[in-house]
Image (cartoon, rainbow, N blue to C red):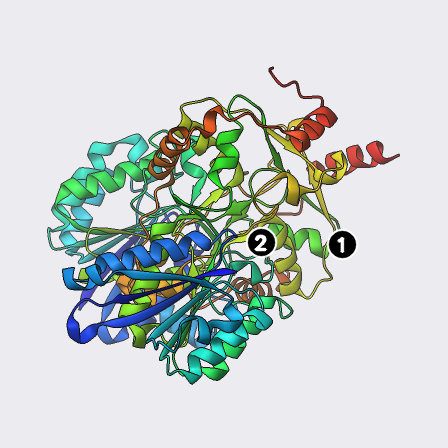
Amino acid sequence: MSCLRWISYGAAAADKKKVFILNTNSGGHAVIGFYFAKELLGSGHEEITSAGGKTVWGDPADVGNVVAGATFDVVLDNNGKDLDTVRPVIDWAKSSGVKHFLFISSAGIYKPTDEPPHVEGDVVKADAGHVGVEKYIAEVFGSWAVFRPQYMIGSGNNKDCEEWFFDHKNRPVPIPGSGMQLTNIAHVRDLSSMLTLAVEKPEAASCNIFNCVSNRTVTLDGMARLCAEAAGLPVEIVHYDPKAVGADAKKAFPFRNMHFYAEPKAPKDRLGWEGTTNLQDDLKERFKEYVKIGRDKKPMQFEIDDKILEALKVPVAV
Amino acid sequence: MAKLVVLQPTKQPPISLLSSSLSNGTKLCQIQVTLFTRGKAPVTQQLPGESDSDYSDFKSKVLHLKRDRQDSEFVKSSLSAEGYDVVYDINGTRLLASNSQYRFICLKPVSKRCQYHTLHDCILFCCINLKSDILPHCEVDAVDPKSRHKGKLNTESLLETSGVNWTSLRPVYIYGPLNYNPVEEWVFHHLKAGRPIPIRNSGVQITQLGHVKDLATAFVQVLGNEKASKQVFNISGEKYITFDGLAKACAKAGGFPEPEIIHYNPKEFDFGKKKAFPFRDQHFFASVEKAKHVLGWKPEFDLVEGLTDSYNLDFSRGTYRKEADFSTDDMILNKSFALQS
C-alpha cells in the first residue's frame, strides 16, 4: 500500500494546478513527498491553502479507482523503482489527461566513473529499474521531468542518514575504505524546492532530467566529523577493508562504499534553482530533533560494528 | 590600439600559448602584446604544430621588455611611460613575498583605467580538515592564510584596495603541450617505460586538470570585460578525476594499454627531497560554474582529449621538461616485492 496524496495548488486563481503525489511509505526518499506537499500548499493564497490537501491510501496499480475519477494537471510518482510498478500510474495519468508527469528516479543509476561528478546526460546502467521507467515516461508524455536524488536529511526521513552517525556517539565510527569517498547529502527542503520550481516552470522543466542533489559534495569522513561537531562531541573514525574483516559494507554502513557524487547542473541551468543546504548548520538542527524525540537515550545494539572493531582490535569504551 | 604587458617568469611555457591566443584572439581589437621577462630564455616558443610562417608572424609582433621585475624603479618608469592598458601578471608570489610595497607602487602609476589580471595557482583553501571535507572549492570560500601561496592572496587583497580594475584567475593543475610542470609528463614517462604507476594511498583522491588553451581562452575573455571586473574565477576542467583515473586517462591518450597501478603508504618511505608523486595528497578541485555563467567561458577539452593533445604535440615527439627518474619508484616496488615474497 502506498500513500496517495493530492492537493490543489496555485499561486493565483488562473494558475491553479492540481498536483497528485503518489508517495511511497518506505525508503530513503519518501520524505520528499511530504515536504513537497507542504511546500505546494504553503505557496498558495489563503483560499487555496484552506482547501488543503487530501490524503488517500491505496494500491498504485489501482490508482484510477482510488482517486475516483478525479483529474489532475501534474502527477509526481515518488513510489516506484521499476516499470511494473509505475506503468499503471503512467498509463492512468496519460488517459486521464494529466499534462505533466514527474518521476523521482535515483542518481544510483549512473554508471560509476573515474571522472566525477555525474551530470545529467552521463551514461546510466542500462539494466537499472528506474531507467526503464524514465524511458517509458518519455515515450508516453510530451511534458515530463525526471529527478535523480542521492541522500537527504530532514524531519520525517524514513531512512537513517545522519542518525547513523549520531547513534555512534561515544563509539568509534567504522567507515569502509579510505573515508575519502565523496557523497552528496542534501536537506530535503532543497529537493522539494526543485520540484516546486518544475511545477511552476513546466516549459523549462519539460523533457529534462534533474540531479536532485546538493550543490556540494562531502567525504564520508567529513560527514562523520560534521555530525560529531553538530552533537558537540569528539569523533574517532576507524577505517576498514570490508573484505578483510568479513563485513558486508552494505549492511554495515548506510552510504555507498565508493565515490557517489552527482551535481545539480540542470536544476541550476534550467530552473534557476539554488541550493541552501549547509550541513554544518542543518546537522545541528537535526541533532536537536534527535535529542527531542529521545533517540539519544534509546539503548542500541552494534553487532556488526563490534565484529568489525574486534577484527581490527579496536577497543570500545563500555 | 590597446597595449598589453605580460609579467612572466620565463620558465612558464604557457606564455607562448597565452601570447598567441591574445594576439590571434584579439586581432579585431588591435592588441599590442609586450612580454616583460628577465630574458633568461627566449620569450617566444614555436608551438608544436604551428607553421614556421605563423610563428615568425607572431614573433615579429611581440615586443620584449627585458629587465628583472625586482628592479622596481625600472618597472615603475617603464610601465607607466608605455601607458599600458592591461597588465597580465602570471606569478605574483615571489614578488609579494619580497616587497609588498613595491607591488603597490607598481600598480598605481600604471593608470587607474588599466586592467590588471593575475593568474594564480589555486590558493590552498584551508588545511583544516573540516573545510576541505566539503567540496568543490568555490570562489567565495575562505582561503588559507597560512598557505604557501599566501603571496597571491595578498596580491588579490592589494588589488582590491588599490582601486585598479582587476581580475584574478585561479587554475588548479594546468596541463597541455609544453607544460613546465611535469604532471601528465610524469605519467607518460612511466607508461613509455612500461613501468607500473605508483600512486600514494588509496588512489581515490580527486584532482582536476585544466588545459592551458582553455586557460588562455579565459585570459582573452576577461580582457575589456566589465563582468570580469574585480572578480575571481576558478578556471579548470569541468569534470574532476581520481588519481587512479588519471593514470588510466593518460594511457588512453597515449594509446598505451591500461596501466598497472600500485598503491603505497608514503609514511613507510623516506624519499628525502624527491617528489614521488606530482599531486597533493588530498581532494583538490574547484567549481568553474562562476566563469561559465558570468563569462560564458567553457572548456574546449575534456580530459582524455586534452591529454591526447598534450601527448601528440609534446611527449610523443620526444620532448619533455624533466628526465624520467624512477628512483622513488624502485624504493616502493622493492618494498612491495619484499612484502609479497
Quadrant that contains the C terminus of chain B: top right
Q: Residue at x 57, y 62 (%)?
A: A109
Q: Quadrant of residue B314?
A: bottom right
Label whose residue precedes the other's in the sequence (1 or 2): 2
Q: In terms of depth relative to the viewer, which is nearer, B57 or A186?
A: A186
Tag of residue B184: 2
Q: Is residue B129 visible?
A: no
Q: Position of residue B122 (x, y in %)?
A: 39, 45
Crowding near the residue tagged with mark 1, few <14, some 14–19, many ≥20 C-alpha atoms within 10 Å? few
Mark 2: secondary structure: helix
Identify the chain of the residue marked 1, using the numbered disc in the image. B
Identify the chain of the residue marked 2, using the numbered disc in the image. B
Whether B226 is drawn above or below B111: the answer is: below
Residue B242 as seen in the image, left or right of residue A243: left
Residue A245 as seen in the image, left or right of residue B273: right
Tag of residue B194: 1
Whether A123 is drawn above or below A163: the answer is: below
Q: Residue at x 48, y 31 (%)?
A: A166
